[in-house]
Image: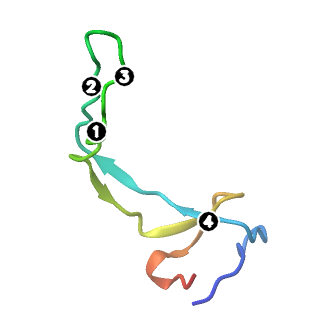
């Protein structure tokens, strides 16, 4: 289904999904005060994408992600 604007408010700029992330984050620091490398900070996080899209302006539900054609 081609949706080119929010059916509730007419916003045609952006929409979003409510995603979920679970797991530990390891943030490293150095004893000498210098910045530590944290490239792998989010490696243990599990991500689950939401099932619906929502309007970026009015926050109302628009459609299921699987039904969106972008």
Helix, strand or loop for disc 3: loop
Q: Quadrant of the N terminus?
A: bottom right
Dot 3 or dot 1, earlier in sequence:
3
Q: In the rendered image, which residue does mark 4 sit on?
A: 15
Q: In the rendered image, which residue does mark 2 sit on?
A: 28
Image marks 3 and 1: residues in contact by CB distance under 8 Å: no
**Image position of 6 (left or right of 29):** right
Image marks 4 and 2: residues in contact by CB distance under 8 Å: no
Residue at position x 77%, y 67% from top? 9
Q: In the rendered image, which residue does mark 3 sit on?
A: 35
**Image position of 5 (left or right of 32):** right
Residue farthest to the right, as pictured: 10
Dot 3 or dot 2, earlier in sequence:
2
Residue at position x 75%, y 71% from top? 12
Dot 4 or dot 1, earlier in sequence:
4
Dot 3 or dot 4, earlier in sequence:
4
User: Where does the image place residue 6, in percent across and percent down from the top left?
Assistant: 70, 72
Circle 4 crowding by C-alpha within 10 Å: few under 14, some 14–19, many from 20: some
**Image position of 52 (left or right of 15):** left
Circle 3 crowding by C-alpha within 10 Å: few under 14, some 14–19, many from 20: few
Front disc: 4 or 2: 2
Q: Quadrant of the C terminus?
A: bottom right
Helix, strand or loop for disc 4: strand
Residues under labels 4 and 1: Cα distance? 28 Å
Give the answer, above or below, for where 41 lies relative to 60. above
């Amino acid at each position: 289904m081609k949706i080119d604007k929010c059916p509730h408010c007419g916003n045609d700029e952006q929409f979003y999904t409510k995603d979920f992330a679970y797991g530990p984050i390891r943030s490293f620091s150095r004893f000498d005060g210098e910045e530590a490398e944290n490239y792998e900070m989010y490696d243990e996080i599990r991500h689950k994408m939401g099932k619906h899209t929502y309007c970026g302006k009015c926050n109302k539900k628009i459609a299921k992600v699987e039904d969106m054609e972008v």
